């Protein structure tokens, strides 16, 4: 088994374990960029839309409300099961974003919410999306912006750097924030034959009730971040949790905790 296969299995197993937790902990945040994501892909009534790395199926469901038809594809069976339970309108199925089981020129638009940095070979995903897009169709994806712009990730990573360690990943994937850089995203799109690249930052605010909610979201509701925290010693974890809670408390205003966690939204078009 290659290291890329190991990373794919790690991601699949991780999302099978974290499907419900991600929906409950990260869903209220990540859904804030769903409509801008569909806008960037040009989704409208009558379109046939593919939602890749669909997770709980937010984008596929939102496309239906626009009068489109949609199919959500995810590598994790638990995510597919959850999406089907949450959204009866779209079709959801298991599959790999790097080897799509669809004919050429099938979809008018493709979207992917926070999945690109979870691909073992993102360039294969881009090429496959180009293949199954109709001429003139757009592929749009969101990824998390990098610290310090992203307060949520900045707080956790700063706490780990101060009180724990960031070891080499057991199953390395693409650099986590690589596609948050518009130059990197545009180059990747261009290499796969896309044109008319566009990028924007979508503001998102994460609302929490208690200071430990942020730490708990990373510890229980993610995959790569959860694996990073699992590598820490019990003492380090206690100090990381304490430090992150202190940083979160400083953001409390009028009794409410609001943490900025913007999305970087990238899109490009298959030539007509």
Image (cartoon, rainbow, N blue to C red):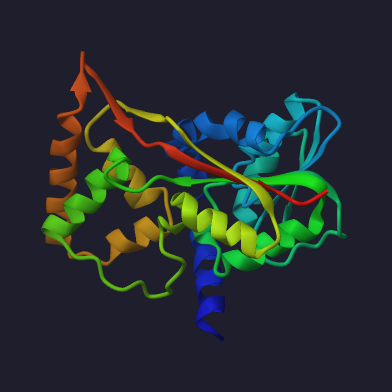
Q: Quadrant of residue 131?
A: bottom right
Note whether residue 20 is visible.
yes
Q: Position of residue 111 (x, y in %)?
A: 66, 44
The extreme top residue here reads 254
Note whether residue 111 is visible.
no
Look at 20% across and 27% down and name the residue there: 251
How many numbered circles are shown?
Answer: 0
The extreme bottom residue here reads 1
As displayed, is residue 181 above or below residue 32? below
- Front residue of 4/93: it is 4
Q: Left or right: 234 with respect to 71?
A: left
- Front residue of 159/237: it is 159
As displayed, is residue 202 above or below residue 189? above
Q: Position of residue 10 (x, y in %)?
A: 49, 69
Q: Left or right: 48 with respect to 59?
A: right
Look at 38% across and 75% down and name the residue there: 170
Look at 70% across and 64% down and name the residue there: 127
- Front residue of 145/16: it is 145
Q: Position of residue 41 (x, y in %)?
A: 68, 39
Q: Left or right: 236 with respect to 16?
A: left
Q: Position of residue 155 (x, y in %)?
A: 23, 44
Look at 83% across and 59% down and name the residue there: 102
As displayed, is residue 60 above or below residue 181? above
As displayed, is residue 82 above or below residue 118? above
Image quarter of the N terminus = bottom right
């Amino acid at each position: 088994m290659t290291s890329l296969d190991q990373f794919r299995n790690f991601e699949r197993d991780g999302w099978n374990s974290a499907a419900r937790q991600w929906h409950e902990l990260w869903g209220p945040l990540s859904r804030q960029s769903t409509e801008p994501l569909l806008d960037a892909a040009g989704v409208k009534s009558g379109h046939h839309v593919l939602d890749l790395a669909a997770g709980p199926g937010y984008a596929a469901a939102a496309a239906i409300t626009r009068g489109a038809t949609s199919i959500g594809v995810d590598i994790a069976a638990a995510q597919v099961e959850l999406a089907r339970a949450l959204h009866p309108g779209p079709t959801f199925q298991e599959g790999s974003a790097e080897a799509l089981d669809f004919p050429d020129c099938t979809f008018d638009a493709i979207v992917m919410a926070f999945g690109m940095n979870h691909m073992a070979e993102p360039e294969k995903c881009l090429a496959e999306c180009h293949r199954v897009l109709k001429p003139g169709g757009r592929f749009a994806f969101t990824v998390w912006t990098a610290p310090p712009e992203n307060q949520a990730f900045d707080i956790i990573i700063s706490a780990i750097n101060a009180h724990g360690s960031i070891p080499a990943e057991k199953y390395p994937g693409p650099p986590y924030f690589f596609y948050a850089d518009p130059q990197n995203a545009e180059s990747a799109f261009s290499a796969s034959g896309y044109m008319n690249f566009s990028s924007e930052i979508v503001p998102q605010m994460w609302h929490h009730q208690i200071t430990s909610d942020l730490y708990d979201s990373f510890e229980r509701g993610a995959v790569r971040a959860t694996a990073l925290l699992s590598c820490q010693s019990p003492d380090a974890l206690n100090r990381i949790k304490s430090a992150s809670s202190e940083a979160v408390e400083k953001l409390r205003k009028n009794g409410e905790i609001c943490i900025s966690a913007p999305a970087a939204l990238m899109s490009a078009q298959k030539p007509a």
